[in-house]
Image (cartoon, rainbow, N blue to C red):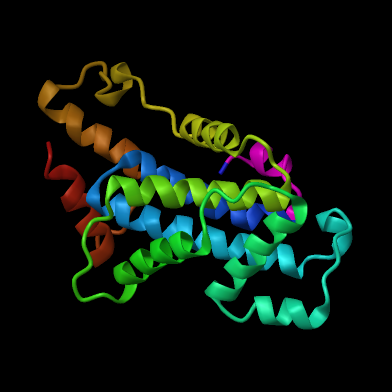
Amino acid sequence: MNKDILEKLKPWMKKPFELLFHAEIHYQKGTDYDKRLSLISFDNSIEVSITTYLTINPIQRGNRSYEGKKVDEWLKNYHTKIDFFISELTARGLPIYNGKDEIVWFHDQRNEQYHGSNAGVPSEETLNNIRQIAIWVFSVLFGISDVESLLQRAITEAEKSFPEIPQKFVTPKFDNIKPEHENSLFIASILGGWDENSTGDNKIIKELTSGF
């Protein structure tokens, strides 16, 4: 992820946001494989956001304090963490868009990807819902008003760090070299040095040259 984006977040927000970021990347790719990973990552981000919030110093969460015994109880498992989040919404007078029953249902869909014998591809409805819940939880607990814009900026910046090689450089031309030798020299220029006695190096060379 782009360093500038992370620097705009407080240190304790970075881990939960990174989970959101990776989930969003898979969500936008949209293959069956990516849908499964997206569901798992969004669900993980919900739990990590709540755990992080409950374990940071009160000064890092708007000076909100909670009784130690209650914190220990909330941190016991996924269900109790959701209990905390719902109670926090009520205490702040914020709307509850999804009840515990719905959030737990989406969590169970994630568990099916891990442990189920009949794990399938998550539906668009499931992905859209758990995505919104994960963004909602992060936004409320860490006070970030427009998480979706921040995610898109992070993805855009990440894409910029992998520029495409200009087409004119893909197969360079060499003076006084026969055309049939150009590809071999191009591969050699990419590889630099290699050990012809190394099985690993020879395997890589074979894979590279198989397309020429």
Residue 96 falls left or right of residue 115: right
In reply to whether residue 145 is colored magenta, the answer given is no
Tell me what residue is drawn at x 66 percent, y 67 percent: 84
Of residues 166 and 212, which is closer to you in this image? 166
Q: How many marks?
A: 0
Quadrant for residue 187, please give it. top left
In the rendered image of this protein, does residue 26 appear above or below residue 69?
above
In the rendered image of this protein, does residue 203 appear above or below residue 68?
above
Q: Dominant secondary structure of the magenta stretch?
A: helix
Tell me what residue is drawn at x 30 percent, y 45 percent: 124
Tell me what residue is drawn at x 21 percent, y 61 percent: 120
Tell me what residue is drawn at x 56 percent, y 78 percent: 77
Residue 13 falls left or right of residue 156: right
In the rendered image of this protein, does residue 64 appear above or below residue 75?
above
Residue 42: give x, y in percent of width and height: 47, 55
What quarter of the picture does the C terminus occupy? top left
| Residue 193 appears anywhere in the view | no
Residue 24: give x, y in percent of width and height: 45, 44
What quarter of the picture does the N terminus occupy? top right
Which residues are drawn in magenta?
A: 2-11
Of residues 138 and 175, which is closer to you in this image? 138
Residue 2: give x, y in percent of width and height: 59, 39
Residue 6: give x, y in percent of width and height: 67, 44
Of residues 207 and 159, which is closer to you in this image? 159
